[in-house]
Each structure stands twice: as structure tokens, then as C-alpha cells.
Amino acid sequence: MSDLTPGDVDAMSVHKPLGDPGAPPPVVDLNDSLVGRLRDLVIHPARLMARVGARPQWWVPGLMVMIVVAAFSWLTSPISGPEQMELMRDSKLMSMVPPEQMEAQYEAAMNPSVGKRITQSITAGLTAWIMMLIFGFVLGFFVRMSGGKGTFKQALGISSWAGLLPFALGPIVKAPLVMATESVFRVNIGLAALMPGGEPGSPVFQTLLAYGDFLTWWGLAVTVIGFSVVFGLTRKAAVTAVVLPWALLSLIPLGLSLLFM
């Protein structure tokens, strides 16, 4: 039994959580850190995506991708430049370029200036980040159309953290292989690498390059987990909402490559 009177109860200070009436107080994950997120990306993607849902921090993986891709471009540009020109020498696009201009472009690719390498590296890094952002917005649209309950900021967070696998881990793994083989286009982590004697300009090779990258598949799997955890989609609905737009968007660079090669 309590000896408190109604007046005593009214005089007491009662503390309630901020926010909507009846809403639980926000939960702060004290163990959430950059190192922890990178670890969970590999060994516990569901826990990573639960943290991303609470704090998307989409710009963090974006900056990481920009730095890694820019560094990869700087390191490999003396190899990729001449190799790209050799690959395009007999292409449909270069057949319209005068031979003198073609030779000038080849010489410039063989000996790029420091300023040009810096510009190309920054451009490559920014382009990779922009691609991640566009993919995140597209996925956010498709997932919401599929009945998912979440925000575009969360969609950007999911796609950006999962995008670390193909966009950041990929260049880190490929860099030593490129330097060892002195080839950018023949170093692949996917089905294209299993194609014996495959020519980088062939339609089959380009198709396998677009749709057969193992790290891209891994990133898509983590993305599906993310939209299931954060947006409340079933696994089947998440797979459809993620894989379909990826397959459609991948047709754009593949189509351009097949058209001009």
C-alpha cells in the first residue's frame, strides 16, 4: 500500500521521453564505429544494416570510395592509358578519327603529365561516388514502390555501405595484380577471368564483365539484406527491387561499349 495522496503524486516530477507520445526513447549503439561497420560488412551484414538504418552516414563510404578509386586511377594510369588506346585503335569510334590525331592521343596516353593524371584521378573518384548516389536513389524509388517503409537517406546509406565491396575492395584487390601483369582490362574478379583467351573488346567478354563480377554480386547480396532489415521487405521483394534496377542500369555502359567497340 502507498501512503502518497493524489496531491503528492501531482507534485512529483515525472520524466517522459522526448518525441511522439508513447514513443520509446532513441537507442544509441555505443559499439557503432567505422571499424565495426567495416568488419560487419564482411562477417555480419545484417547487424551493419541495422546500424545503417539508425545512422545512414552515406557520405562516409562515399568518401572512402572516392579516395580509393582516385588512388587506383593515379597508380594504374600509365598502364590503363596506352592499353585503352590499343584496345580502341581498331574500334568503330576510332575509325572516324584521323590517323594523325590518333597517334597524338596515343603519345599523350604513353606519357601523361602530372596535372592530367591528377585530373583523371579526381574525375574517376567523383564519378564512382556519383554512380553510387544515383544507384542509391534508384533503389530507394524501386524499394518504396515495392512497399518498403524507409527514407531515401536510408536507401543511400544501404547502397553506399554495400557499394564498398565492388567500388573500394575491388580496386584494392586488383591494384597489385594490375601492376604485376601490366594490364588493367585483363584483371577481373569474376566470370570474365574464367574466359580462356578472352579479348577485352569482344561482346561475350564485355557482357561477363558487366554481369559476372563476384564482388558486385556480394555487394548486391548485402544490399538485399539491408533493404530487408531496414525497409521491412521480404527477401523475395528485396531481391526483385535490387537486382532488376541493377540489371537495367548495367545495360547502359554495356550497350555503349558494344556499340562503339
Image: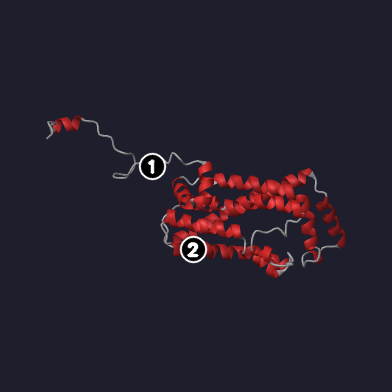
Going 78% across and 43% down the picture, which residue do you hit? 114
Camera-side residue: 64 or 153? 64
Going by the numbered disc 1, the residue's amino acid type is Val
- Asked which secondary structure carries label 2, the reply is helix
Crowd band around label 2 with a 10 angstrom C-alpha radius: few (<14), some (14–19), many (20+):
some
Is residue 20 visible to the viewer in this orientation of the structure?
yes
Camera-side residue: 68 or 21? 68
Going 58% across and 47% down the picture, which residue do you hit? 62
| Residue 19 on image: x %, y % | 34, 42
| Residue 11 on image: x %, y % | 19, 30
- The mark that comes first in sequence, 1 or 2, is 1
Going 80% across and 45% down the picture, which residue do you hit? 113
Residue matched to label 1: 27
Residue matched to label 2: 239
| Residue 4 on image: x %, y % | 14, 31
Residue 191 quadrant: bottom right
Residue 219 appears left or right of 103: left
Residue 13 quadrant: top left
